Amino acid sequence: MTSSYTQREILETLRMAELEHFDVRTVTMGISLLDCAHEDPREAARRVYEKLTRHAAALPRTVGEVADSFGIRVANRRIAVSPVALVATRPEPESYLAIAREIDRAAAEMGFDFVGGYSALVHAGFTRADEALLASVPAALSATARLCSSVNAGSSRTGLNMDAVLKVARLLKETAYLTREQGSIGCAKFVVFANAVEDNPFMAGAFHGVGLPEVVIHVGVSGPGVVCEAIRRAGPCDLRELAEVVKRASFKITRVGELIGREVASRLQLPFGVVDLSLAPTPVLGDSVGEVLEAMGLERTGACGSTAALALLTDAVKKGGAMATSAVGGLSGAFIPVSEDAAMIAAVEEGVLSLEKLEAMTSVCSVGLDMVAVPGDTPEETLAGFIADELMIGVVNHKTTAVRVIPAHGKRVGEKVSFGGLLGDAPVQALRTLSCSGFVRRGGQIPAPVTALRN
């Protein structure tokens, strides 16, 4: 693939890496664990550990070698595994907790940053294994450092499982308490979805879908700084021209990401999966989706016009990526995680970006309400209503939406929760205190919208 790159493209890539905070955010290896099933939980856990170390041990070194050879930083090495609730064993919480410990041990020994896939797909109901895994999530996330967990609670074909949403709210409260000495960080490693995708390389929602190969390599790129600088250089152009600027920048980012991913896959003799071309921010100044929106002409993220600007940005990123590769996958668009984006944090602290405005913006972005902190004493019914509101945006609009919310134990509105590193600092935001208990405690399934009848 290197022969298709011109000297100008190579120089532009070097500039992006050196001056515009460009990196490949993650190379993620997807691994199927379905053949690790065993009625003895200890044997199932042993099989999981053995399979992970057999397939993934060479990835961190290979990624480092490829990154060095191309002069591009790869920020994270990650693993996504089959939804662990599908790994049949004795359907008891302790059985799945044993698997969680072995996944985390393998990741630590091999030098991985995160492993996603401690997950259950319950959008239409629960198996006994699903219930056991969900019951184990608080203990698993408090006892591990690298493990990430997710639940798919809704889809456009099935509607929203409100019983699952209530279980999620309950486990979040428990997880927040168990990890209270670390700012309730366990909740930052858990996400609840509607319309979850099976080839997402980003955490905390990555898992290896049952329709994928035994082992596969995915890439998640980033590049808010690249897009931001391109917009600034373009000056006062009109919105159609601005979309073209974003498309061209996204094209370049995607080309580099695919080059890295395919080279890693080739060296490991594995199939290449997808490029997730989402703009994924970090707390570093200059690497912010909020700054991109402000470069487009908003005084501050949260101003009127923020949803429209984000819609333009997300669409242009997708179009640029689609021109660059036929392997677009994952979520692909723009992420707006509050704690991981310096401009978003500033907007929240200044009182110009509320949770209600964030919710409106999620109707056009890649995921949803991501890395938002709320008071630790928030009732579980309020959390459930908050989650349900966001997930129904995805169910009705046939898009992926998600919630990663931290009910920070002991924290109140206006305080800050610090996670360090990529996860950053989250200002604690106010949730509406009016009760929704009578609604969410009805339980059952919110039916699928009529648009589900598409065949």
Image (tube, rainbow, N blue to C red):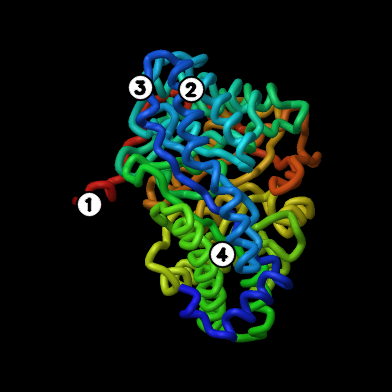
Q: CA distance from mark 2 to mark 3?
A: 20 Å
Q: 129 above or below 1?
A: above
Q: Which residue is mark 3?
A: 127
Name the mark on residue 45.
2
Q: Amino acid at mark 3?
A: Thr
Q: Amino acid at mark 4?
A: Leu
Disc 3: CA contacts within 10 A as few (<14), some (14-19) or many (>=20):
some
Q: Which residue is mark 1?
A: 454
Instruction: Inspect this view and state whether residue 365 appears.
Output: yes
The kind of secondary structure element at disc 4 is: helix
Q: For the residues carrying marks 2 and 3, which lies nearer the camera in this image?
A: 2
Left or right relative to 426: residue 135: left
Quick check: marks 3 and 1 in contact, CB under 8 Å?
Answer: no
The kind of secondary structure element at disc 3 is: loop
Q: Quadrant of residue 18?
A: bottom right
Q: Check the image and name the residue furthest to the right.
A: 415
Q: Position of residue 406 (x, y in %)?
A: 65, 35
The kind of secondary structure element at disc 2 is: helix
Q: CA distance from mark 2 to mark 4?
A: 43 Å
Q: Amino acid at mark 2?
A: Ala
Of the two numbered discs 2 and 3 on the same chain, state the one appearing first in sequence: 2
Of the two numbered discs 4 and 3 on the same chain, state the one appearing first in sequence: 3
Instruction: Inspect this view and state whether residue 332 appears.
Output: no
Name the mark on residue 301.
none
Q: Position of residue 167 (x, y in %)?
A: 50, 24
